[in-house]
Amino acid sequence: MNIRPRRLRASKAIRDMVAETSLSPTDFIAPLFATEGKNIKEEIDSMPGYYRFSLDLLRKEVKELWKMGCRSALLFVKVSEMLKDNTGKEALNPDGLMQRAIREIKEAVPGICLMTDVALDPYSSYGHDGLVEDEEILNDETVEVLAEMAVSHAQAGADFIAPSDMMDGRIEAMRIALETTGFINTGIMAYSAKYASCFYGPFRDALDSAPGFGDKKTYQMNPANHREGIKEALLDIQEGADIVMVKPAMAYLDVIKSVKEVSSVPVSAYHVSGEYAMIKAAAQKDWLNEEQAMVESLTAIKRAGADLIATYFVKDIIKYLI
Ligand code: PBG
């Protein structure tokens, strides 16, 4: 035999030398959940080891992430039930939880790349990402509110806004809104190929944002579709997205790969709450080795083509790498 592939696997030194994919702390985006109150660090039931923080403790958390080598965070807020309605007006409140959290984080760690979630679900009395009329999720009316929301986040100090709503035409509307208000350097990371997935379940527990009626299938994508994911990513790039995202990650590696092949901008992937919860639950039962499952999953997502990965394992993976 002249060709023995096993020669390249003979020792750890050789395996590392010829590895085609490697992970680095700067690959990762840390999702953050903010809540009202003081001195609050609440564990999310369905996301063991992951927490909602009040702003005082969130500052500490972000400082810790920064010190570890994490360079980017993606901010979500849990809005009190009283403030939810079908207009999204709390989303535009300059002193709303999101806007205050942005200011606190950027004050605590000015260098961090802070990305903020733009969608109406945490603010919606219906738990939907847009305005609702007769059980329909309105597109164009929602886009108008989202564009204002983007500007409001930029005013508070967000470096990137991250629209996760899946309305048509929102990237162009947000880009125009940001340009015309002077936020020419505020970036957009578009959730471009976002699928209607059951793997968001634990996240909806974290933010108390599950849809009150129906599901999200008229705006989020059908898991059966691959080419449509490419279409969505290309549209968002054309509309002005600086980064495009595929979400979830593990069940959509083919979409990540194809988007990477055609994309002229960086591609991110969201290793979502359900993907985290599955590994945690199996590890708690001693059915999987948690660290190995984490490393293998994140390596696979990067191998598929993700330049950036949002993951709830952010601290664990950085600790593992350094
Ligand atoms: C809502 C939003 C969701 C996630 C990010 N932004 C949930 C949804 O669309 O229902 C999911 C993140 C996760 O599961 O980790 N706009």
Image (cartoon, rainbow, N blue to C red):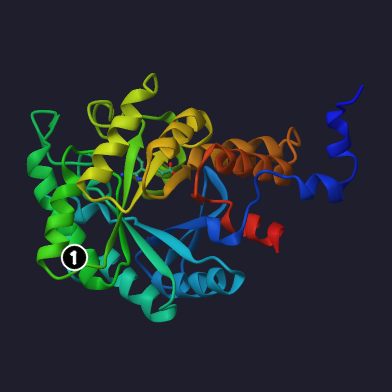
Badge 1 amino acid? Ser
Q: Is residue 169 left or right of residue 294?
A: left
Q: Is residue 89 visible?
A: no
Q: Quadrant of ligand 1?
A: top left
Quadrant in the picture for residue 220? top left
For image coordinates 90% across by 25% down, the residue present is 2
Q: Quadrant of the C terminus?
A: bottom right
Indicate left or right for 220 with 252 as reference. Answer: left
Please tell me whether mark 1 sits on a helix, a strand or a loop: helix
Residue under label 1:
152
- Number of labels in the image equals 1
Q: Position of residue 127 (x, y in %)?
A: 25, 40
Q: Nearer the viewer, residue 44 or 277?
A: 277
Q: Is residue 299 left or right of residue 288?
A: left
Residue 269, relative to residue 187: is it above or below? above
In the image, is the residue at mark 1 within 8 Å of ligand 1 by its beta carbon?
no
Q: Position of residue 298 (x, y in %)?
A: 60, 44
Rendered-image quadrant of the N terminus? top right
Query: Between residues 136 and 293, which one lies in front from this camera angle?
Result: 293
Residue at the spot 9% in from the left edge and 49% down from the top edge? 144
Q: Residue at x 46, y 40 (%)?
A: 202
Position of residue 88 in the picture relative to residue 117 (left or right): left
Which residue occupies the foreground of this view, 120 or 16?
A: 16
Q: Which residue is outermost to the top?
A: 224
Classify 183 as above or below 87: below
x, y percentage for residue 103? 31, 75
> Pointer 1: residues within 10 angstroms few (<14), some, or many (20+)?
many
Q: Residue at x 37, y 76 (%)?
A: 106
Residue 36 visible from this viewpoint: yes
Query: How far across and down, in percent of the image, does residue 284 sit?
Result: 70, 40
Figure quadrant of residue 319: bottom right
